[in-house]
Image (cartoon, rainbow, N blue to C red):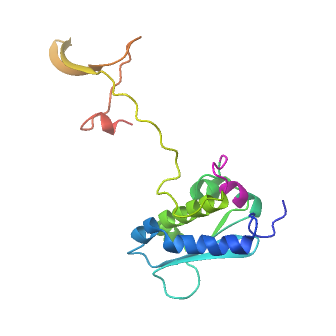
Amino acid sequence: MQDQGWPVPDAPGFLAAWQASAAGDALLRRWARHAAVRFAFESGGATAGFAFNAPPGAAAFTLAAPAEAWAKALQPVPPRHHHSLFAMRMRVPGFTLRGEELAFVQHCHLARRVLEIGRWLAAGHATPVPVSLRPVMAEPAPAEIIGRYHRVEADGTAHRLHAEQAGEGLDLLCLHTAGADGRQSP
């Protein structure tokens, strides 16, 4: 694919719809209420700019990539290394971040949401864009868990250990680190 701009049909119409959808996105409005930033996405010299409470001027940062990279990033389920801006930055040849690194890191959540909006529109969906583009998964049935304390003696010292048991099959022993509880395991 030749890098001649955005890899979508009717690129000027897409870019205008993308900017309008981002401007009207309720989630972006909430996230950006304390932001003051202007940034852009660029493909083959064609730029889509986005501003959040920022005065007119140059973009603080620009995320640029060849059209074939954006074509993959805008797929409903992007392939490996094209699913996030950080993955693209680390692994996609030709992807560059121009401008202020700090501004990008401070506002990458806004840029990620803007890209999600672009992905939604590129798939032919109408706005509003759902809060999450991840498919909804059914909640698993709660496990029947039995918890109890066991008295264990080691090196002549008695210890009281708590254990939980669920399911069938071979026992699996999981030990967590010295944190407050199992949620702090490595």
Report the side of 91 relative to 59 (left or right). right
Report the side of 183 relative to 10 (left or right). left
Report the side of 157 relative to 35 (left or right). left
* Predominant SS of the magenta segment: loop
Q: Is residue 80 above or below residue 102?
A: above
Report the side of 72 relative to 3 (left or right). left
In the image, residue 54 lies at what x, y percent?
48, 83
Residue placed most toward the observer, 90 or 70: 70
Q: Is residue 108 above or below residue 154?
A: below
Q: Residue at point 44% right, 36% down?
A: 138
Q: Is residue 23 above or below residue 56?
A: above
Q: Is residue 7 magenta?
A: no
Residue lying furthest bottom in this view?
56
In the image, residue 35 lies at what x, y percent?
42, 75
Query: Split into 4 quadrants, where in the image is the C terminus?
Result: top left
> Do we see residue 69 in this rendering?
yes
Query: Split into 4 quadrants, where in the image is the N terminus?
Result: bottom right
Q: Is residue 72 magenta?
A: yes
Residue placed most toward the observer, 155 or 33: 33
In the image, residue 98 lies at what x, y percent?
63, 72
Q: Residue at point 81% right, 66% down?
A: 3
Q: Which residues are magenta?
A: 70-80
Where residue 40 sits, quadrant-wise, is bottom right
Where residue 156 sits, quadrant-wise, is top left
Q: Residue at point 63% right, 51% down?
A: 76
Q: Is residue 16 above or below residue 141?
A: below
Q: Residue at point 40% right, 31% down?
A: 140
In the image, residue 153 lies at what x, y percent?
19, 12
Residue placed most toward the observer, 151 or 34: 34
